[in-house]
C-alpha cells in the first residue's frame, strides 16, 4: 500500500476504496474553497480570516493538481453543448 508522501503525492489507498475511484471531483474542491471563503467572512479576527483564506487557496491549488474525473468531463460536455460548442 502506498502512503502519503511529503511532496504531496497521493496515496493509492486514498484513491481506491473497494475497487472504486474515490477522488473528489473538481467541483468538490471549489465547494470546499467556497466554504472556507464563507468562514473567512464570518471570522472574528484578522488572524482567523487569514487562516480561512489560506485554506481556501489551498483547496484551489489541490483542484488544479487533480486530473479530470469522468464527472468533470461530463459537466464540461454539458456546458459545451449548452453553449452550442458540442462539436469540439
Image (cartoon, rainbow, N blue to C red):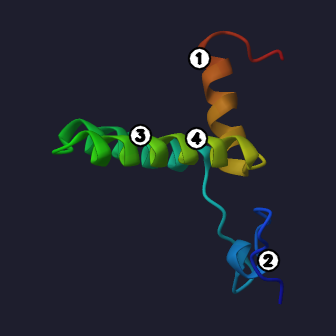
Q: Nearer the viewer, residue 38 or 24?
A: 38
Task: Tell me which label, 1 or 3, sits earlier in the chain.
Answer: 3
- Residue 53 badge: 3
In the rendered image, residue 8, in percent from the top left (x then y), is placed at 75, 62
- Name the front one of labels 1 and 3: 3
In the rendered image, residue 83, in percent from the top left (x then y), is placed at 62, 11
Q: Are marks 2 and 1 in contact (CB under 8 Å)?
A: no
Categorize mark 4 by other alpha carbons within 10 Å: few (<14), some (14-19), many (20+). some
Q: Picture quarter containing residue 33?
A: top left
Task: Tell me which label, 3 or 4, sits earlier in the chain.
Answer: 3
- Name the front one of labels 3 and 4: 3
Residue at point 61%, 51% (across, down): 25
- Name the front one of labels 3 and 2: 3
Q: Nearer the viewer, residue 46 or 52?
A: 46
**Label 3, label 2: how far apart the Cα atoms are:** 29 Å
In this rendering, position of residue 80 left or right of residue 60:
right
Categorize mark 3 by other alpha carbons within 10 Å: few (<14), some (14-19), many (20+). many
Q: Is residue 47 above or below residue 24?
A: above
In this rendering, position of residue 65 left or right of residue 63:
right
In the rendered image, residue 65, in percent from the top left (x then y), is placed at 75, 47
Task: Tell me which label, 2 or 4, sits earlier in the chain.
Answer: 2
Q: Which residue is mark 1?
A: 82
Q: Picture quarter containing residue 18?
A: bottom right
- Residue 27 badge: none
Label 3 secondary element: helix
Q: Are marks 3 and 2 in contact (CB under 8 Å)?
A: no
Residue that sits furthest to the front in the current view: 47
Dividing the image into 4 quarters, which one contains the N terminus? bottom right
**Label 3, label 4: how far apart the Cα atoms are:** 11 Å
Categorize mark 2 by other alpha carbons within 10 Å: few (<14), some (14-19), many (20+). few
Label 4 secondary element: helix
- Residue 12 badge: 2
Amino acid at each position: 500500500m502506498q502512503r502519503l508522501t511529503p511532496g504531496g503525492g497521493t496515496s493509492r489507498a486514498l484513491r481506491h476504496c473497494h475497487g472504486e475511484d474515490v477522488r473528489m471531483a473538481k467541483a468538490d474542491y471549489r465547494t470546499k474553497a467556497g466554504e472556507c471563503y464563507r468562514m473567512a467572512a464570518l471570522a472574528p479576527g484578522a488572524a482567523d480570516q487569514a487562516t480561512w483564506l489560506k485554506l481556501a487557496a489551498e483547496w484551489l491549488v489541490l483542484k488544479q493538481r487533480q486530473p479530470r474525473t469522468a464527472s468533470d468531463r461530463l459537466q464540461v460536455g454539458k456546458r459545451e453543448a449548452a453553449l452550442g460548442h458540442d462539436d469540439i
